[in-house]
Amino acid sequence: MKSQNVRITRDLTRPEAEGVHFRLLCMTGKNKGLVYYLKGKRVVLGRSDKIDVQVLDTKSSREHAELTRFGNTYIATDLGSQNGIIINDLKVSQHQLTDGDKIIIGQTVFKFNIIVVKNELIEVDEEDEDEEDDDEEYEEEVTKKSKKKAASPADKKKKLIYAAVAVLLVVMFLPSEPPKKTTKKPVVAKEDKSLAEVLRNRNKDYDQETEEKIDVILHRGYRELRENNYMRAIEEFNMALILSPNHGRASASLEKSKMLLDEQVKSQFNKAKREIDSLKYQKAVRIYCSILRYLQEKPEDERYKRADKEIKAIIDEQGLRADEVKCF
């Protein structure tokens, strides 16, 4: 559905129109690369296809959050969603956005930008041109007068006398020894050095702060991993990689979680097959349901589709009603 509150494009070039432009860039997810230019006073984000910015994410509510125009920016507000919104790395209910802020809904990340376009053309008034012409005429008149005055013999004689007097005065008051030259240390180098130190300290503080936040997220991921909640652990480790894409511990933990999930799902399929061979269909259904719960965040996964298909086959063969089997 086309919205009047946003303009959607894939063009990342800077707008040409003069003024202030507000932009959302989808950085992850199924709509990665889409650019939303905000035009309305209220812009709604969510999973529904009838709102302004659709978020194709299983963690997104139908109407998840809204952006409200306030002065020269927007305010992001959670609309009572189940999973909430994260601005940069902090879960909030409301936040005034600044240039470069990241809005995170589930695994989908949007980057907010404020783009100011100014008109750099300079107009020249006719009055300025007339003033320049007057200045040129005035300079020509002064030049002519100075030439006439220089042609006078009396003036030449006076100038020679003044010059001779000036030379005598310089010789009389000239010091016997030339002053010693002192070399001053360049200040620029010191300023550059201090500026470099400030930047290093600032980056150091930023890296330390980011690392502390990543440690909190990793701690949650490890807890989910110990409790065999592999999909939740994968979500936490992915969140850490959003803050630091090359983080070693987060990458290793993510791969470990995926491997354990694959092993668990494979084991459950084998167990369900043994139950079917033993004609224990109800137990097999419960095992297939556990596979669906493991993969509930990835319904497009082939293993999810296979488990769902096996459940439907058992229902048909045993003459059960569909409402008798509920996995969730």
Image (tube, grey):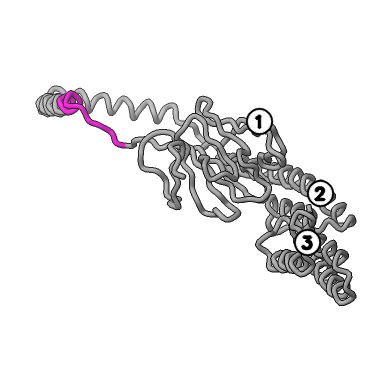
Residue corresponding to mark 2: 215
Name which residue lies at 40% across and 37% down.
Answer: 117
Question: In screen coordinates, is 170 left or right of 286?
Answer: left
Q: Which residues are magenta?
A: 121-132
Residue 296 is left or right of residue 129, and the answer is right
Is residue 150 visible in the rendered image? The answer is no
The alpha-carbon separation of the residues under discs 3 and 1 comes to 48 Å
Residue position marked by numbered label 1 in the rendering: 94
Say which of 14 and 286 sits in front. 286
Q: Label 3 crowding class (10 Å Cα cut-off): few <14, some 14-19, many 20+?
A: few
- Disc 1 residue crowd, few under 14, some 14–19, many 20+, Cα 10 Å: some
The nearer-to-camera label among 2 and 3 is 3
Asked which secondary structure carries label 1, the reply is strand
Mark 1 vs mark 2: which is more N-terminal?
1
Q: Residue at x 87, y 75 (%)?
A: 274
Q: Where in the figure is residue 30, as x and y percent of width and height? A: 57, 56
Query: Is 180 covered by the magenta stretch?
Result: no
Q: What's the amino acid at mark 3? A: Leu
**Mark earlier in primary sequence (3, 1):** 1
Q: Amino acid at mark 2?
A: Asp
Task: Name the residue located 39 percent from the left edge and 29 percent from the top edge.
Answer: 170
Q: CA distance from mark 2 to mark 3?
A: 49 Å
Tell whether 133 sits left or right of 41.
left
Q: Is residue 76 left or right of residue 256?
A: left
Looking at the rendered structure, the kind of residue marked 1 is Gln
> Which label was assigned to residue 210?
none
User: Badge 3 is on which residue?
Assistant: 320
Answer whether residue 85 is visible to the viewer in this image: yes
127 in magenta: yes
Instruction: Classify residue 298 by image quadrant.
Output: bottom right
